[in-house]
Amino acid sequence: MRLSFTKMHGAGNDFVVLDGTRHPVELTAAQARRLADRRFGIGADQILVVETSTTPGVDFRYRIFNSSGDEVEHCGNGARCFVRYVHARGLTRARRVKVETVNNLLELVLQDDGRVTVDMNRPVFEPALIPFDAAGLTPRRAGPGAGFELWPLVDAGGRPLGEVATLSMGNPHAVMRVEDVVAAPVAVLGPLIEAHARFPRKVNAGFVQVLSPTEIQLRVHERGAGETLACGTGACAAVVAGIRLGWLDAVRRRVTVHTRGGDLVIEWPADDAHVLMTGPAEFVFDGEIEL
């Protein structure tokens, strides 16, 4: 099978984008891994497949495969690349596009400066829906009002890993605050948290350093991909957790997130509101590959 592809990135989180609107694209896990392989394939954190939607009022459908070959629910940086791709390829002229994923409906807006704003929907906190197994755990509550839960995690040998806030942004996240994100042991703690038994579908592990009430620095070990240069849903999860825990400004509720690949702006106007993410989406190159 010979595939045409486009390489893109959103703040360094990189993607191989495939057009499945004209001809169906069905990838096996092995083929997805081959495309994502940085030595024997093209190289990417995720593979994005653009498809038409059969749902009334929805413009497109898109599927997301991690570099591990697993199909996953959501990718915020990928969503930004998605809307730039369909607009540049003439698949739509609309600057506001509705897109469905395996478990979500997103609204994407292409701004005049080329950045993209994604409506990431509401965060989910119910442990069973994240999913997170909280049975037998006693959380520490922090933040204004009734506060928000920080859950203690230990490894298989009973050694403490630290406290995490848990939530879903369409995919599961565990957020840990650190004093120095550059020095944080992401390569060690990330895989341990990702595969922790408390997360039956694994989890994205975020490590956040609070720089000011409106500014954080973030590293994320992504489920099935390892540490990436940026993670859109991880940025949203970190800001939501930070506001609820009192780390971040709960009045303006607009936070700049510095990642290793670039900056994202996250807005959460109210506790019952959708989260909005704005950031870059860039083309790298086009090509063909034989699978």
Image (spheres, rainbow, N blue to C red):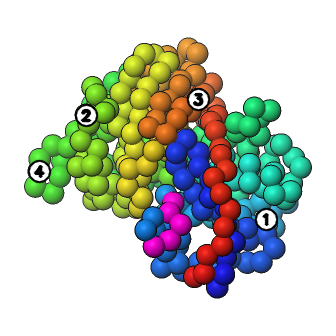
Task: Give the amino acid at mark 1.
Answer: Ser
Please give the name of the residue rendered at 31% of the width and 33% of the height, measured from the top-left corner.
Answer: 182
Give percent across and percent down for residue 131. Answer: 42, 54
Mark toward the start of the polypeptide (4 vs 1): 1
Residue at position x 73%, y 45% in the image: 107
Numbered label tally: 4
| Residue hosting label 2 | 183
Say which of marks 4 and 1 sits in front.
1
Front of the two marks 3 and 4: 3
| Residue 25 drawn at (x, y percent) | 68, 76
Q: What's under tag 4, amino acid-wise?
A: Gly
Camera-side residue of 147 and 220: 220
Q: CA distance from mark 3 to mark 4?
A: 37 Å
Q: CA distance from mark 4 to mark 2?
A: 24 Å
Q: Counting other residues with Cα less than 10 Å from the Cα at mark 3, is it few (<14), some (14-19), or many (20 or more)? A: many
Q: For mark 1, does the 10 Å Cα neighbourhood hold few (<14), some (14 to 19), or many (20 or more) residues?
A: some
The magenta span reads 40-44
Q: Which residue is mark 3?
A: 265
Are circles 4 and 1 on residues that touch, CB within 8 Å? no
